[in-house]
Structures are given as C-alpha cells and as structure tokens.
Amino acid sequence: MTDPVEAVLHYGDGEFAVLKAGRFVRCVISGVEIPLPALRYWSVELQEPYLGPTELLARLAR
C-alpha cells in the first residue's frame, strides 16, 4: 500500500484544480486530512481548505 500523498490545489469559484496529485488536503484550522472527494469548503482569496463550515467561519472571524 502506498503512503497517502497530500495534494496541492488551486481553489476557484465552485471548483478546484489539482496542481500536484494527491489523495487529500489538510484543513488549515484543524489540521485534519480532507479526502479530495469530500472537500466542500475553501477560500478562493486565501487559497485555503477547510474541513467544514465551522472551520471556515472560525478563519473568517480572525
């Protein structure tokens, strides 16, 4: 079995582009691995992924 590889993405409006192939990205707030098929929340402006709406709101509140 291969080691999981963290992907590098470019986050756009409603979609993302894979710049470096991988199986997951890491939430910038919680550090939790997010499988790419489950990724639903990110910031286009900050180019950051979030586990869910709670983490997104926490980041925007900073």
Image (tube, helix red, strand yellow):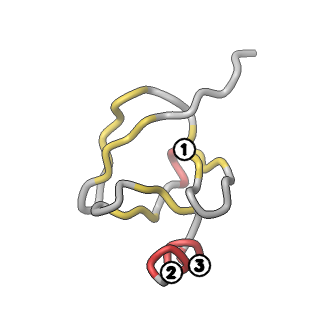
First in residue order: circle 1 vs circle 3: 1
Tell me the quarter of the picture where residue 1 sits.
top right
Residue at the front extreme, as displayed: 62
Q: Is 26 situated above or below 8?
A: below
Q: Is residue 4 left or right of residue 12?
A: right
Q: Hey, what amino acid is under mark 3?
A: Thr
Mark 3 nearby-residue class (10 Å; few <14, some 14–19, many ≥20): few
Q: Is 59 situated above or below 15?
A: below
Q: Tell whether label 2 touches label 3 (CB within 8 Å).
A: yes
Look at the numbered disc 2 and give the secondary structure of its residue: helix
Residue at the left extreme, as displayed: 13
| Residue annotated with mark 1 | 25
Q: Residue at x 58, y 56 (%)?
A: 27
| Residue annotated with mark 2 | 57
Q: Nearer the viewer, residue 3 or 27?
A: 27
Residue 10 is situated, as x and y percent measured from the top left of the image, at 31, 44
Q: Residue at x 56, y 69 (%)?
A: 52
Q: CA distance from mark 1 to mark 2?
A: 18 Å
Mark 1 nearby-residue class (10 Å; few <14, some 14–19, many ≥20): many
First in residue order: circle 1 vs circle 2: 1
Which disc, if any, is residue 16? Answer: none
Q: Hey, what amino acid is under mark 1?
A: Val
